[in-house]
Amino acid sequence: TTTTTTTTTRRRLRHTVAISREIPDSFIDAISFHYNQSSHHDDAATALLCSQDKGVSLLKSREQHTNYLNTLRQHIPINKLICLPPLESHPDCLFVEDTMVAIQDTVVLTRMGHESRRGEVDDSIKSVLCEQLGLKNVYDMNNDSIEGCCDGGDVLYTGRHLFVGITDRTNQVGFQYLRNVFAHH
C-alpha cells in the first residue's frame, strides 16, 4: 500500500490516503519472494493452497491482506482507502508502493527495474491519482523515454529528506529523475 498525501501532527505522520490492490490468483508466481521453499503435495486441494515451488498459500496471503486492510481502516477514513482490482498478468501487483513515489501533491509513477513488473503502472492507478484524487503534479517515468528505473520500495521520505537506494531495481538515472522532480516541489 502506498500513501499519496501526508500531514504532520505533533511529530506523528498521519496518512490521509492509501492505495492498495487486491491479490491476484497469480500471486503464487510473484518474483517478490526471496526464498524457495520446496514441498510436495499429494492432492489437488493442497496444491491449490500452496505453490509447489514456493510454499505460498494464496488463501493465507488473502487472509493476511484482509487483516492489513482492516488495520489501515482503523487509521484512515474508509473513503480514503482505495483498493484497486488485481492484475492477473502481474503477480506482484499487490505491492503498489513500488509503482510510485508520492510526497504531498507530487507523484512520480516509476519505471520498475524488473521488466516483468512494468505493466503494473496501469490506467487504474493513473485514474485514481488524477481523477479521483485530483493531483496535478503527476510525472510518469514510463512516458519520458529514459533508461532510468526506480522501485518505490527503494525510496524513503523522512518528511525532510528523500533517501534513494541504488539497487538492481533502482539505478542512478532513476534517482536523478526523482531528484529533478522533487527539487521543484
Image (cartoon, rainbow, N blue to C red):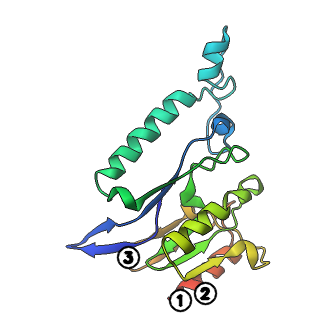
- Which of the marked residues, 2 or 3, is nearer the chain's N terminus? 3
Q: Are marks 1 and 2 in contact (CB under 8 Å)?
A: yes
- Whole-percent x, y for residue 60 in the image: 49, 29
Q: Amino acid at mark 3?
A: Gly
Residue 129 is labelled as none
- Whole-percent x, y for residue 59 in the image: 53, 28
At x 69%, y 37%, the residue is 29
Q: Secondary structure at mark 1?
A: helix
Q: Label 1 vs label 2: CA separation?
A: 5 Å
Q: Amino acid at mark 2?
A: Asn
From the viewer's side, name the closer residue of 119 and 180.
Answer: 119
Q: Secondary structure at mark 3?
A: loop
Residue 180 is labelled as 2
Q: Secondary structure at mark 2?
A: helix
> In the rendered view, does 131 fall on the left or right side of 82?
right
- Whole-percent x, y for residue 123 in the image: 67, 64
At x 53%, y 89%, the residue is 183
Residue 165 lies in quadrant = bottom right
Q: Residues within 10 Å of mark 2 (few under 14, many from 20)?
A: few
Residue holding disc 1: 183
At x 69%, y 43%, the residue is 88
Question: From this viewpoint, is residue 164 visible?
Answer: no
From the viewer's side, name the closer residue of 18 and 32.
Answer: 18
Residue holding disc 3: 159
At x 77%, y 77%, the residue is 146
- Whole-percent x, y for residue 17 in the image: 40, 65
